[in-house]
Structures are given as structure tokens and as C-alpha cells.
Image: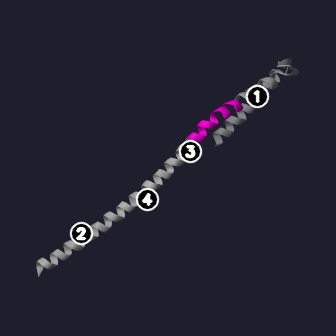
Amino acid sequence: MRIFSIIAVLVALLAVVFAFQNAITISVKFFNVNFEASLAIVLILTLGIGILIGLLVSIPSVIKRSSKISKSKLKIAELENESHKYLETITHQRQRIENLERHLNLKENQ
């Protein structure tokens, strides 16, 4: 997490340097809307919109992956419970076998 913070600060510093070096005003036309803004602001806003679109596009795959992970965790829990039941059955059967063997040994010794 610390590395992410350091990278974020570095990117912010680079954005500030970029803004100071590209402070000229440009005219932007989008459909029928015209406005003037700093080149740096326009580029940073464009970058932000691109990042937002990228995040929105990735949301379905993130949801699908987390759903798969949840289902897998449930399946693992079910299999662990089943495994414990089998181990209990095996332990119980081993005790029965030992009791039968002891009982047979007692009869043979008489």
C-alpha cells in the first residue's frame, strides 16, 4: 500500500509539472458546444474520462470473478465438511474393528 501511495504522489507531481508547462489556452469543440480551457486541463480531464471508462468496462469481469470466488469458497466449505464426516466415519469404523478384534481375541483365549 505504501508503494501505491508513493506512485500516486509521483503521478500527481508529474501532473502539476505538466500543467505548468502546458498552460496555453485552447478552444475545444464537442458537438455544438465550444469552450476554451487550458491544454493541461483538457488533457487531464480526457485522461480521467478514459480511466473512468476503463473502470466501467472492467466492472462486469470483476463482478463475475468475485462471484466465481464466492461459489468456490462455498464449494470448498462443503467439501471440507464432507471430508470431516468421512473422517469421523472412518474413525468410528476403526474403533468398531478394534472392538471386534478384541472380542475375537477374548473368545479365542477362552
Quick check: marks 3 and 2 in contact, CB under 8 Å? no
Per the image, the residue denoted by label 1 is 15
Question: Type of residue at label 4?
Answer: Asn
Whole-percent x and y of residue 66?
A: 57, 44
User: Which mark sits nearer the N-terminus, 1 or 2?
Assistant: 1
User: Which mark sits nearer the N-terminus, 4 or 2?
Assistant: 4
Per the image, the residue denoted by label 4 is 81
Question: Type of residue at label 2?
Answer: Ile
Under tag 4, what secondary structure?
helix
Badge 4 crowding class, 10 Å Cα cut-off, few under 14, some 14 to 19, many 20 or more, is few
If the image is split into quadrants, where does the N terminus sit? top right
Q: Compared with residue 14, is residue 26 higher up or lower down, i.e. above or below?
A: above
Whole-percent x and y of residue 27?
A: 86, 17
Q: Which residue is at 11% across, 79% downward?
A: 109
Per the image, the residue denoted by label 3 is 67
User: Which mark sits nearer the N-terminus, 3 or 1?
Assistant: 1
Question: Of residues 3 and 76, which is closer to you in this image?
Answer: 76
Colouring rule applied to residues: one colour
Give the CA distance from mark 3 to mark 2: 45 Å
Whole-percent x and y of residue 25?
A: 87, 19
Give the CA distance from mark 4 to mark 3: 21 Å
Give the CA distance from mark 4 to mark 2: 24 Å
Question: Type of residue at label 3?
Answer: Ser
Going by the picture, which residue comes out furthest to the bottom? 110
Badge 3 crowding class, 10 Å Cα cut-off, few under 14, some 14 to 19, many 20 or more, is few
Left/right of residue 99 with respect to residue 31 in the rendered view = left
Question: Of residues 76 and 25, which is closer to you in this image?
Answer: 76
Q: Which residue is at 78% across, 27% downward?
A: 45
Per the image, the residue denoted by label 2 is 97
Q: Which residues are magenta?
A: 51-64
Magenta: main secondary structure equals helix
